Amino acid sequence: MTVLVVGAGRVGLVMAVALARLGHRVVGLEKDAERVELLRRGRSPFWEAGLQEALPEEMESGRLQFLHLDEQAGITGTAGMPGSSQIVMLCVGTPPASAGGVDLSQLEEAVDSLLPWLRGTNRKVVLVTKSTVPVGTARALAARIEAYGLSDRVLVASNPEFLREGTALEDALHPHRIVIGVREPEAAEILRELYAPVDAPTVVTDWQTAELSKYAANAFLATRLSFLNELADLAEAMGADVVQVAHCLGLDPRIGPHYLKAGLGYGGSCLPKDVAGLLHMAADLGIAPVLLGAVAAVNAARPGKAVARLRQALGGRLAGRVVAVLGLSFKGGTDDLRSSPALEVVRQLLQAGARVRAYDPAHAPAPDLARGLARAPAREPARELAIVKARAAIPDPGGSLAIFPEAYEAVRGAQAVAVLTDWAEFPQLDWARIRALMTGRVVLDARLCLDEARLAGLGFTYLAPGRGQFPASPREAGEHG
């Protein structure tokens, strides 16, 4: 089949590559001309596991190409546009709007830009919303298509994505389920054909149910995380270990082990936005979901609790203290900084007068090549952009933030180290070397990813959510001399 994928962001580019991998012919449409040129060179504008390797392979196969979608002029380079396309997959950004709503302007602009092509196509087309959109969007889109006089040839479907950053390509190729919301059975059959190579349960339902299923999934995952974080506060006060409590919970088949991890709270582009979006939709309907409101409130408090632990461990003040931060992304395996709780911790540390020395594998400045630390060339464009975004995301008028190319440089002279992202490399660091480079001994394991016994054995004061402080007192932990 031939598919037009509109938007080459974290959802659109992954879906374009995955669909090409499944044997379809895919045309990616993107409004950012510079991004189109980068993609045509086979370079991903962001980091995602396996994507940089798969992108040029699919382009060289002839199954994947990219065109510029101009908001005013329509599609640039229409000679490359297949007239026989059956599916248009909308993967544009749907960022938060004021008061917790969703900004659908990019979706509307994309549809308007496609109008000349839609009017000229010679067969029925399924217009699919892949991006997360409020319940009722497909119905509104169908009304828009009808107003354009295209309802006889354009069918609307909802096909929400369930991708996880860091494993998005794998999730697209091997999804746990496929949800298809339609009004016309013909649209469902076309999408079934699209996903025929995929071995996954398929649910065909109505528009509203499909749209709500995405919000429900993310809200439930957020609820599990906030529950564990609230449980961590209880465990800490009671002298219990939240990690072992979570393990006991996960062994119950009615609960399962996934998303049972206390820490710094959830972030990224999905869970915070979708919880807020569901609350906003509920308010419009006159419903006040108590549980969802509590989920968001618990999450919002986590960065402040981490900063408070550091302040207490460093003698009650942060002004003038040197804190090394390991991790800026909202989770390991991605360079995404959106709604990252790690960034909120850094902001609060800077506001309190601390000096912050940061390192993140996806946001490290280009190191001195003589040190042998250069990243693989394929990651350079995405990494350079990530560094710019990292600096832009953290207000630092006092110049108290420095970002380093490796962890060992970041921890030099630090009185405390805060692990704020669960990158796989952090537990593997030489913590004895880190201990020698620091002037203090406090380690805040905000992601519960380090070996507590190992660090305590090296003389660190180990702090973590849902666990007590071990072994030193706050006065002993701060600094030498």
Image: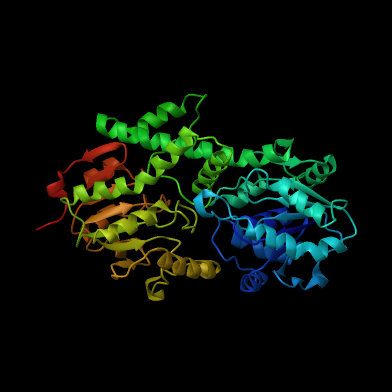
Q: Is residue 12 left or right of residue 355?
A: right
Name the spot of residue 436 as percent of width and height, x first. 21, 58
Query: Which quarter of the figure has residue 150?
Result: bottom right
Q: Is residue 464 left or right of residue 392?
A: left
For this orientation, the residue located farthest to the left is 481
Name the spot of residue 432 as percent of width and height, x first. 25, 53
Residue found 31% across the figure and 55% down from its top: 430
Q: Is residue 23 visible?
A: no
Q: How is the image coloured?
A: rainbow
Q: Is residue 36 visible?
A: yes
Q: Is residue 479 left or right of residue 280?
A: left
Q: Establish if 38 lies above or below 189.
A: below
For this orientation, the residue located farthest to the front is 286
Q: Establish if 480 lies above or below 476.
A: below
Residue found 80% across the figure and 55% down from its top: 147
Q: Nearer the viewer, residue 481 or 144?
A: 144
Query: Which quarter of the figure has residue 371?
Result: bottom left
Name the spot of residue 455 as percent of width and height, x first. 26, 46
Q: How many marks?
A: 0
Residue found 36% across the figure and 32% down from its top: 231
Q: Which quadrant of the figure contains the C terminus? A: bottom left
Q: Which quadrant of the figure contains the N terminus? A: bottom right
Q: Nearer the viewer, residue 64 or 272?
A: 272
Q: Establish if 252 lies above or below 164.
A: above
Query: Which quarter of the figure has residue 193?
Result: top right
Name the spot of residue 6 as percent of width and height, x first. 70, 60
